[in-house]
Amino acid sequence: MSPAPKLERRAAMATLLAGRGDDLLVVPGLGSTAWDLAAAGDNDRNFYLWGAMGGAAMIGLGLALAQPAKRVAVVAGDGEMLMGLGALATIGLQKPANLAIIVFDNGVYGETGMQPSHTQTGADLIGVAEACGIGTCLDVRDEAGLADLAGRLTCFSETLFARVQIAADDPPRVLPLRDGVALKQRFRAALGLDA
Amino acid sequence: MNASALPVWPDKLFDTFKRAGIRQVGYVPDAGHARLIDRCRADPDMRDVVLTTEEEGVALAAGAWLGGERAALLMQSSGVGNCINMLSLPRTCRFPMLMLITMRGEWEEFNPWQEPMGSIVEPVLKLCEAEIYRARTPDEVEGLAERAVQQAFGDERIVALILSQELIGKKVWTK
């Protein structure tokens, strides 16, 4: 039996966020996942990264601890997650009930010319997340798995890690706002905080 | 050493954190910060977050501020080097970034491997547009910490309070 065709990244992001309410805060990694998030529709509760590679999951942790009544989804590529792999150990220790780390794993560094990443033939990110003590670890391979994950994003109650196996394609870029101060201020304003 | 001989400046730092409303404290353990870490860990209103590398703490503090909480980051001088690229996050977005740095590689250092990073802590932080304060004696720690807090959170700046090796004391190498 041949493996199921991999998920398309833009459609996957749209599916995950289709039922999004105001209580979901989203932090993408830099690069392709930021373009995917922008393509799914801009939102003041998105904090797009244009740099700080390796920091997405930890921004999510600080945010999740500060906003326990909201849910936080970090959606990062495999390259971003690999650079901040230690964050999974830190998050596994803290166990925030309202933080989901979702990795769009295509096994390549898409922004830089599709060089193979460590996950293509070696590193198993789900194994790492499980070994770090993260409560729920999911391997999302198809539409049914994606729909399940989208449902969980509205109601999960322990730290969640998901690898979403996406195809290694490179859709046209959709560029979000890149003024960091403006992104920060509108995000805080959306939470009712002083800009 | 009896209890009365313990230095009080780590407790002054803790008091400053409490007055400032610090809620998240990220750290890579360091002997010079041990007392402060213990105080933070024992406080039910503070979340202590042990990190695998210091740059995680820069991202943590940015996330905390996005969510309306104040964070502080504790590290040894060697950790400053690990933070450099991640400091582009507070520089670009003007996140408050309060860093307390215990020095190695200067006064009476036994381990020469500490000197390369220790010797460039201040110039590197300056290049990262951090405001830098250095405490050399116990009685100036609290005042400088207050100033650092005001500047970090009031002006949304990267602020480093450097705690000199002379203040912390010599690491004892014989057991």
Image (spheres, coloured by chain):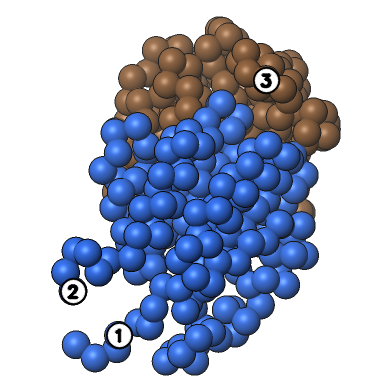
Chain colours: A brown, B blue
Q: Give the residue pinned by disc 1.
A: B172
To which chain does the residue with label 2 belong? B
Does B28 sit left or right of A25 as displayed?
A: left
Residue at image position (42%, 92%) is B110
Query: Tag 3: residue type?
Result: Asp
The kind of residue tagged 2 is Met
Do we see residue A134 in this rendering?
Answer: no
* Tag in front: 3 or 2: 2
Q: Is residue B7 above or below residue B95?
A: below
Task: Tell me the crowding category of disc 2: few under 14, some 14 to 19, or many 20 or more residues within 10 angstroms, Cα based.
Answer: few
- The residue at which mark 3 appears reads as A194
Q: Secondary structure at mark 2?
A: loop
Do callouts 1 and 2 mark residues in contact (Cβ within 8 Å)?
A: no
User: Along the line of sight, which residue is nearer the eye, A41 or A23?
Assistant: A23
Give left or right: position of A44 versus A90: right
Percent from the top left, x then y, of residue B100?
A: 52, 58
Chain letter of the residue beneath label 1 in the structure image: B
- Give the crowd class for mark 1: few <14, some 14-19, many >=20 residues within 10 Å: few
Residue B164 image position (x, y, % from top left): 52, 73
Callouts 3 and 2 on one subunit:
no
Q: Is residue A71 left or right of residue B151?
A: left
> How far separated are the C-alphas under marks 3 and 2?
47 Å
Q: Earlier along the polypeptide chain: callout 1 or callout 2?
A: 2
Q: Return the residue at label 2.
A: B1
